[in-house]
Image (spheres, grey):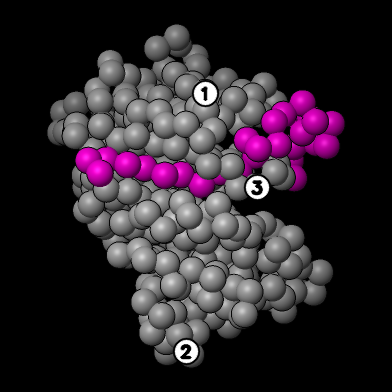
Amino acid sequence: MEIKVLGSAAGGGFPQWNCGCPNCSAVRTGSFQGKARSQAQIAVRGDSSSWFLLGASPDLRLQIENTPELHPLPGVRQSPVAGVVLTSADLDHVLGLLLLREFQPIRVFAAESIIRILREDNSFMRMMNRVPTQVQWCPTPQRAAFELDGVGNTSSGILATQLPLGKRYPAYVSDERALQLLPEEASSGLLLEHRGKRLGYFPAVGQVDDELMKTLSKLDLLLFDGTFWDEEELSRVESSGPTAQHMGHIPVGGPQGSLERLTALDIRNKVFIHVNNTNPMLNEAGPEYRQIREAGWSVAEDGWQFTL
Ligand SMILES: [Zn+2]
């Protein structure tokens, strides 16, 4: 399985348009020891030449242009992107779908509740189905494997499993609407398995329980929620900012943080992704970056690739 990191930042990207925090300011002036990043986006490929996107970020057009493997062959109006897997209805995770509305048949795999929010509550999404052969919406089960295959059944040999992680729908979904949806379909992590190798993509994890620890212990590559370093990070740049926990993210640092909880796990490759622009571990000259490197982790950068 080939895995490409097209984007590695949390929502807003790095730098973020309205943010003058120490990280964003330094990266703009070129004095930052670390990289700018676009919003989190992964692409995977198995046995066929088709690629599958994990999420559809608002930065998707440029991310595809920056990745030659995702370009159409010269003279042909046909992208090698065959499908998209969605794990939540968050805007940072689904806005890029609208950029894929060019009448190319693709499959969108998502839990039924996510599909209902997108298709029934957002009239923009009708652009995805102007002709019957455009987007095929494929409802996915929770905790049961499904195969990533494109239109025409080009099989990737990749088995995907959605694992429920959070019960809160995005703020644009009303409380009344949320009552009509299944709480366990609100936000998931993804396990992908191909020829005995396993990738875990967990960009939004509110808490690490024993069940999750067991799941993570069997992975060859873990891409894990690196959104915030500590609980109060946002309130330091935005006085009314919510805590990390309130946003559905376990912080990386501190005694209850993911670094402490997960470091003992026997995983060959542990990588933080979905890193918010305020997170001090983006600064490669800082103590937080040193701490995660010494614990055997790395921080994903746009353009990284892995082969499992
Ligand atoms: Zn910032």
Residue 244 x, y percent position in the rendering:
68, 66
Amino acid at pointer 1: Pro
Amino acid at pointer 3: Gly
Give the answer, above or below, for where 218 lies relative to 136: below
Mark closer to the chain start, 3 or 2: 3
The secondary structure type at the circle numbered 2 is loop
The secondary structure type at the circle numbered 3 is strand
Viewer-nearest residue: 132 or 28: 132
As measured in the structure, the alpha-carbon distance from the residue carrying label 3 to the one carrying label 2 is 31 Å
Viewer-nearest residue: 205 or 301: 205
Mark closer to the chain start, 1 or 3: 1
Residue 305 x, y percent position in the rendering:
26, 57
Q: What residue is disc 2 on?
A: 286
Q: Residues within 10 Å of mark 3 (few under 14, many from 20)?
A: many
As measured in the structure, the alpha-carbon distance from the residue carrying label 2 to the one carrying label 1 is 44 Å
71 sits left or right of 258 in the view? left
The verdict on residue 111 being magenta is no
Residue 111: name its quadrant: top right
Residue 58 x, y percent position in the rendering:
50, 47
Q: What residue is disc 1 on?
A: 139
Q: What residue is disc 3 on?
A: 166
